Image (cartoon, rainbow, N blue to C red):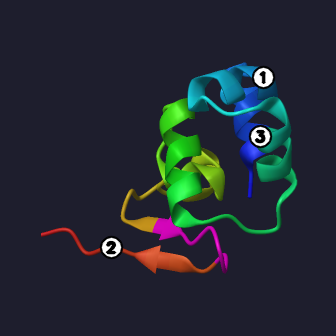
């Protein structure tokens, strides 16, 4: 997960995230260092940071369209995903 990176990109501290989520700083520290989190917790973090939940896993650059705008790169496996536009 990219929670630490998203915090930095948004200019948030862990304390600011804790305040937004109405939880303790120690709770946020546990979330940030956890190997996995529930979907509910991830939704709360994403909401507090005002980002889509996928951004906690992949950066916007990882899902940007390629030059032809009809192909994306999967942030998980790195394979191209072709999109047919009609």
- State if disc 1 and disc 3 touch (CB < 8 Å): yes
The relative height of residue 11 versus residue 14 in the rendered view (above or below) is above
> 10 or 84: which is nearer to us?
10
Which x, y percent locates residue 15?
Answer: 78, 22
Residue 84 belongs to magenta span: no
Q: Secondary structure at mark 2?
A: loop
Q: Which mark is residue 15?
A: 1
List x then y, in percent, for residue 47: 48, 38
Q: Residues within 10 Å of mark 3 (few under 14, many from 20)?
A: some
Residue 74 magenta: yes
Give the x, y percent position of residue 51.
50, 38
Q: Residues within 10 Å of mark 1 (few under 14, many from 20)?
A: some
From this view, report whether residue 9 is shown above or below residue 45. above
> Residue sitting at 52 percent across and 45 percent down?
44
Residue numbers of the magenta segment: 72-78
**Mark in front: 2 vs 1:** 1
Q: Residue at x 63, y 56 (%)?
A: 62
Residue that appears at 74% across and 68% down: 36
Left or right placement of residue 85 versus residue 58 in this view: left
- Mark before the other along the chain sequence, 3 or 1: 1
Q: Which residue is mark 3?
A: 28
Q: Which mark is residue 83?
A: 2
Q: Is residue 64 visible?
A: no
């Amino acid at each position: 997960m990219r929670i630490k990176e998203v915090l930095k990109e948004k200019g948030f501290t862990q304390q600011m995230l804790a305040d937004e989520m109405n939880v303790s700083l120690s709770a946020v520290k546990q979330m940030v260092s956890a190997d996995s989190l529930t979907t509910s917790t991830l939704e709360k973090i994403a909401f507090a940071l005002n980002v889509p939940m996928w951004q906690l896993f992949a950066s916007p650059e990882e899902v940007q369209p390629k030059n032809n705008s009809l192909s994306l790169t999967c942030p998980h496996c790195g394979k191209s995903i072709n999109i047919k536009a009609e």
